[in-house]
C-alpha cells in the first residue's frame, strides 16, 4: 500500500497528540520503524505535559494554522451549546405584557452569528470543508496507475541524459508528473482547476471568519 492510500485511511486529529496517524507516519523512511515509534512516544509524553502546563505543545506551533482551524470552531461550538447569556446590544428591546422592558431576541441572533463563525472556520480546513473536489476519486485512481506504471514521481520516465546529470549532482532524481503524459493530462487539468477553485473558496471563508472574529472578539465570553 503506497503513502497516498495510507494517508487517506488514517485520520489526523489535531487535538489528540496520541493519534494513530502521526505514529504511522513517524516510521516512514526510517531504518527501524519500531525505534522511530518509541522516539515518537517519548515526544508525545513531552507534548502532553506542555498542553497541560501551558495550553499548547511544540507540535501545535509547527502547524499553528491547523491547530487554530480545529480549536477555534470547537471552542465556539462549546460556547454556543453551554452559554448562559448573549450580547445585550443584539436583538431588539420591547415591553412585555407585564410592562417590563426586555430583550430576549438577542439569543437567536447570537446563535446565528456563532453558527456562521463555526461554519466558516470549518470551511477553512480542507478535511472539514463541505466543498469537495468532484474529480478526487478519478484523479486518485489515475495517480495510483501512474505510480505503478512509471514509478514514484515518474522515476521510470527519466531519460539517459537526466540519469547522467543526476549522477553528476551526487544523487537524487528528476521528478516527472502525470500531467506530462497525454493519457493523464485531462484528469490532471480538471483536478488542478477544481483545486484552485476550492483553495480560493477556503481563503474567502478564512477572510470572512477573521472579519467576524475582529467584530465580535470581545463578545466571546460567558
Image (cartoon, rainbow, N blue to C red):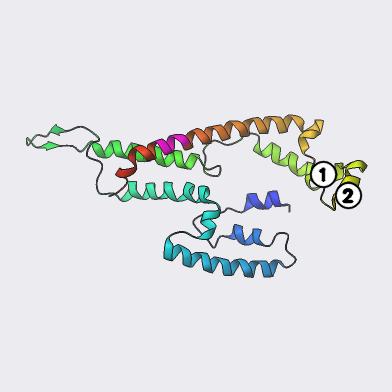
Judging by the rendered image, the residue that carries numbered circle 1 is 174
Where residue 44 sits in the image (x, y, percent)? 55, 66
Judging by the rendered image, the residue that carries numbered circle 2 is 168
Q: Is residue 92 above or below residue 160?
A: above
Q: Look at the image and tell me in which quarter the N terminus lies.
A: bottom right
Most extreme residue toward the left, as rendered?
A: 99
In whole angstroms, how far apart are the C-alphas of marks 1 and 2?
Answer: 13 Å
Closer to viewer: mark 1 or mark 2: 2
Where residue 176 sits in the image (x, y, percent)? 80, 40
Res 13 seen here: no
Give the residue at x 65% y 58%. Answer: 25
Relative to residue 215, is residue 18 drawn left or right? right
Relative to residue 55, is residue 142 drawn left or right? right
How many labels were placed on the picture?
2
Where residue 179 sits in the image (x, y, percent)? 76, 34
Give the residue at x 51% y 47%. Answer: 65
Q: Give SS at disc 2.
A: helix
Res 207 seen here: yes
- The answer to whether marks 1 and 2 mark residues whose Cβ atoms lie closer than 8 Å is no
- In primary-sequence order, the first of circles 1 and 2 is 2
- Count neighbours of disc 1 (C-alpha within 10 A) and say few if under 14, some if 14 to 19, many if 20 or more: some
Q: Main secondary structure of the magenta part?
A: helix
Q: Is residue 61 above or below residue 177?
A: below
Where residue 139 sits in the image (x, y, percent)? 70, 37
Which stretch did the figure color magenta?
Answer: 207-211
Quarter occupied by residue 34: bottom right
Amino acid at each position: 500500500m503506497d503513502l497516498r492510500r495510507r494517508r487517506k485511511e488514517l485520520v489526523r486529529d489535531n487535538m489528540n497528540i496520541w493519534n494513530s496517524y502521526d505514529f504511522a507516519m513517524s516510521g516512514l523512511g526510517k531504518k527501524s520503524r519500531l525505534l522511530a515509534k518509541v522516539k515518537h512516544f517519548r515526544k508525545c509524553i513531552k507534548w502532553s505535559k506542555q498542553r497541560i502546563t501551558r495550553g499548547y505543545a511544540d507540535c501545535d506551533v509547527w502547524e499553528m494554522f491547523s491547530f487554530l482551524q480545529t480549536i477555534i470552531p470547537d471552542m465556539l461550538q462549546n460556547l454556543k451549546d453551554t452559554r448562559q447569556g448573549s450580547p445585550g446590544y443584539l436583538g431588539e428591546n420591547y415591553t412585555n405584557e407585564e410592562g417590563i422592558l426586555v430583550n430576549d431576541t438577542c439569543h437567536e441572533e447570537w446563535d446565528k452569528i456563532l453558527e456562521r463563525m463555526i461554519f466558516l472556520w470549518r470551511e477553512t480546513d480542507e478535511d472539514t470543508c463541505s466543498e469537495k473536489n468532484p474529480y478526487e476519486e478519478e484523479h486518485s485512481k489515475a495517480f495510483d496507475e501512474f505510480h505503478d506504471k512509471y514509478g514514484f514521481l515518474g522515476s521510470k520516465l527519466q531519460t539517459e541524459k537526466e540519469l547522467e546529470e543526476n549522477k553528476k549532482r551526487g544523487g537524487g532524481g528528476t521528478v516527472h508528473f502525470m500531467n506530462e503524459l497525454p493519457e493523464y493530462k485531462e484528469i490532471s487539468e480538471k483536478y488542478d482547476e477544481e483545486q484552485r477553485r476550492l483553495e480560493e473558496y477556503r481563503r474567502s471563508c478564512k477572510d470572512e471568519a477573521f472579519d467576524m472574529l475582529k467584530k465580535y472578539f470581545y463578545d466571546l465570553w460567558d
